[in-house]
Each structure stands twice: as C-alpha cells, then as structure tokens.
Amino acid sequence: MYNQLKTFIFLFVLSAIFMSLGYLIAGSNGIFIGFFLAAVVNFTAYWFSDKIILTMHHAQSVHPGDSFGLHEMVERLAQRAGLPTPQIYLIPDHSPNAFATGRNPHHSAIAVTQGLLGALSYQELESVLAHELAHIKNRDTLVGCIAATMAAAILVVARTSPWGIFFGTPTSSARTEGRKSNSAFRVVVMAIVSPLAATLIQFAVSRSREYMADLMGAELCGSPERLANALQKIHSMSSGLPLASGNPATAHLYIVNPFSGTALLNLFSTHPSVEDRIAKLLKLG
C-alpha cells in the first residue's frame, strides 16, 4: 500500500516537473506540451517501463536449461519466497551486476549481466538472485522502474532543450529581444538543472530498500556471508569495469551502483555504501 501511494505521488510530482520544464522552454504554450508529454510518459512508465529498461540494456530472455541453470535457480528461490517465477534475462555486459524490474510480482523480471555469471560462485549467484526476489516481494520494482523511465525522459528533454528558443511566443515585437534573451537564459539553466533533477528523482528512491532486500535475500538463501561476499566482489570489479550498456537513469535499479567509478554519480547515488551493507549482513551471521 505504501509503495502504491508513493508511486501515485511520484507520478504527480513528475507531471508537475514536465509542465514546469515545458514552461521554461516555451512559455505558457509549453505547459500544455508538458502536460501532454507527462500523460504519455506516465502511461508508458506504468505499463511498459520494465520492457523499456530491458530493451535499453539489450537483455536477452533466458529459458529453462540455459545459462548456468539460472531459470531453475530462480524458480526454486521463488517457490521458497511464495512468488511466481519471474522472467529471467541476460545482459551481454562484462561488468558484474543484476537488477529486478516489473510493476508487480506477477509481471516481474530479473536481469543479470554476463559478467556476473563468471564473477561469482554458484552459491553467491544464488544470494544475488534472492536479493532481487526480495525487491519483487517488497514491490520496490514499480517505483524503481518509473523513476528510471522518468529520469531518462527528463534527460532527453534536457538534451533537446536548445530547441525551446525557437518555440517562445513573445507578446509584442518590443519584447522580442528581451524574451529571446530570457529564453536563452532559461534554456541554459534547464540544461544544467535537468540532469541533476533526474538524479535527484533517483535519490528519492529510499536507500532503506537495499538494506531490507539484503536482509530478506540473506534469509531466503540461508547465508548472509554469501551475499556479503557477492556484494564485495561486485563492488570491487564494477569499480574498475563500469557497465557499458547502461544509462545513469537506471543506476538505482542495480544491486550495486554500476557507475561507481564516476565521482558525480557517487554524489547522488541511491545506494547505501557497500561497506555498510556488508557490515549489517555479517552481524546477522
């Protein structure tokens, strides 16, 4: 119930952001454009954000019998958690990582990178999958997916913002030059603020959800130490090998920040420190 309310508020706030950005780009006419875009993006984000995110990462569906017994492993863990088995996807990327997506447990998916399969032992991989199933059970995935889709959309608006200069509608010829000057100023401000706003949207995703998923995942796989070891390996390797196929707008979805090598993204990271997460897990052990 809490996540459903949070999702509604999130969509409302982001609609206001789109309308505000529309005004900054094109004045009063831009408010209507922003409202229309917000409606389209809200609808798309709710119903199709998981598919959009999987497509962004070139994820390939995994079937029973493929890829290290991934499907069978997830199916066994899902039964233990009392969940329907999510769809399984493989991302062709050498950086080790994983995330869960979907609007509810009956429409969910888990994606792992190719690098994760080679970096972890069988038991460590199982602990990572248990962590992602915990996100699905806690219904964290809908908010995360919508945040990723919205943030990506705002980044697109930011990149195309210079076109707003041509859509301004001065009220009189005497104000034309002043209006153009103001438009140019607004565009510059928006081009700087929008990417930060997108990152702050991701920051709105509660950090506590990672701690909860760690604890539930450790309980589900039966070993806090295995998940702690997996987190340490993923963190160490991804620091020197950031995700090549990802997008900053989706960073908060992953079990470990896949772009941790970038100082600016560290500043706005939605993840608690890996050291803190490991410490909490080892206390359980």
Image (cartoon, rainbow, N blue to C red):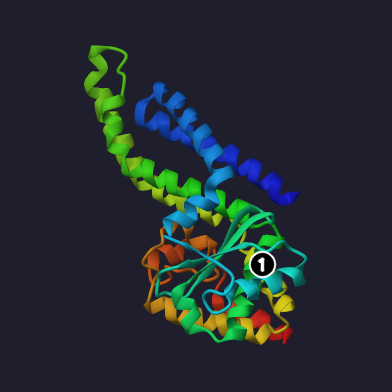
Is any part of residue 30 visible from this angle?
A: yes
Is any part of residue 148 visible from this angle?
A: no
Kind of element beneath mark 1: helix
Q: Describe residue 180's horizontal placement relative to residue 203 as left or right.
A: left
In the image, residue 279 above or below residue 46? below
Please name the residue that numbered disc 1 is placed on.
133
Label 1 Cα neighbours within 10 Å, binned few <14 / some 14-19 / many ≥20: many
The spot of residue 266 in percent (x, y) is 45, 67
Front one among 201 and 254:
254
Residue furthest to the front in view is 65
Q: Residue at x 32, y 44 (%)?
A: 159
Front one among 201 and 160:
160
In the image, residue 219 above or below residue 243? below
Q: Residue at x 43, y 44 (%)?
A: 153
Q: Describe residue 197's horizontal placement relative to residue 222 as left or right.
A: left
The image shows a total of numbered marks equal to: 1
The quarter of the picture where the C terminus appears is bottom right
The spot of residue 261 in percent (x, y) is 39, 72
Q: Callout 1, which amino acid?
A: Leu
Instruction: Tell me where residue 259 sits by quadrant.
Output: bottom left
Instruction: Tell me where residue 237 sits by quadrant.
Output: bottom left
Q: Residue at x 48, y 57 (%)?
A: 54
Q: Residue at x 70, y 73 (%)?
A: 77
The spot of residue 185 in percent (x, y) is 29, 36
Front one among 5 and 77:
77
In the image, residue 269 above or below residue 275? above
Front one among 254 and 275:
254
The spot of residue 47 in percent (x, y) is 58, 43
